[in-house]
């Protein structure tokens, strides 16, 4: 089980298993935003405060706790005027 305010493991898996060619623009953008927000959550949450399952999930998905903040990247075919969180 993932920690609060983090993307669920099942959501990550289903997103990764579905090919991008079968996703619409909105779904691609949503996956990208969720993934980037989860990476941000991994970076700002100290390992000492993560559950064991979250540490394992971060390790498997490549979300290391390096406390770096990355810009949110969106698919190139998506054009937005405003992006609000």
Image (tube, rainbow, N blue to C red):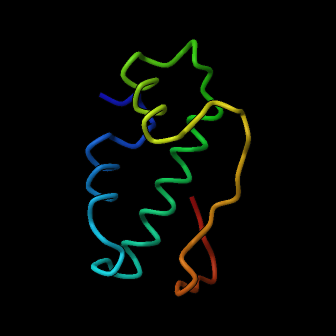
Location of the C terminus (image quadrant) = bottom right
In the depicted structure, whether residue 41 falls above or below residue 36:
above
Residues 35 and 16: in front is 16
Horizontal side, residue 62 vs residue 20: left or right: right
Location of the N terminus (image quadrant) = top left
Callout count: 0
Q: Position of residue 24 (x, y in %)?
A: 34, 81
Horizontal side, residue 44 vs residue 31: left or right: right
Q: Name, please, the residue furthest toward the top.
A: 48
The residue under the point 30% across, 71% down is 19
Residues 24 and 13: in front is 13
The residue under the point 45% across, 36% down is 5
The residue under the point 27% across, 66% down is 18
Horizontal side, residue 50 vs residue 68: left or right: left
In the depicted structure, whether residue 13 falls above or below residue 4:
below
Q: Position of residue 30 (x, y in %)?
A: 43, 66
Q: Position of residue 58 (x, y in %)?
A: 47, 33
Q: Position of residue 25 (x, y in %)?
A: 41, 81
Residues 63 and 72: in front is 63
| Residue 22 figure quarter | bottom left
In the depicted structure, whether residue 19 falls above or below residue 43:
below
In the depicted structure, whether residue 34 falls above or below residue 24:
above
Q: Name, please, the residue furthest toward the right.
A: 68
The residue under the point 36% across, 22% down is 53
| Residue 69 figure quarter | top right
Horizontal side, residue 38 vs residue 14: left or right: right
């Amino acid at each position: 089980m993932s920690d609060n305010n983090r993307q669920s493991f099942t959501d990550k898996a289903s997103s990764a298993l579905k090919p991008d060619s079968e996703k619409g623009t909105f779904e691609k953008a949503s996956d990208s935003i969720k993934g980037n927000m989860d990476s941000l959550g991994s970076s700002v949450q100290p390992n000492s405060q993560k559950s064991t399952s979250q540490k394992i999930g971060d390790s498997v998905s490549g979300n290391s706790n390096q406390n770096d903040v990355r810009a949110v990247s969106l698919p190139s075919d998506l054009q937005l005027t405003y992006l609000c969180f």
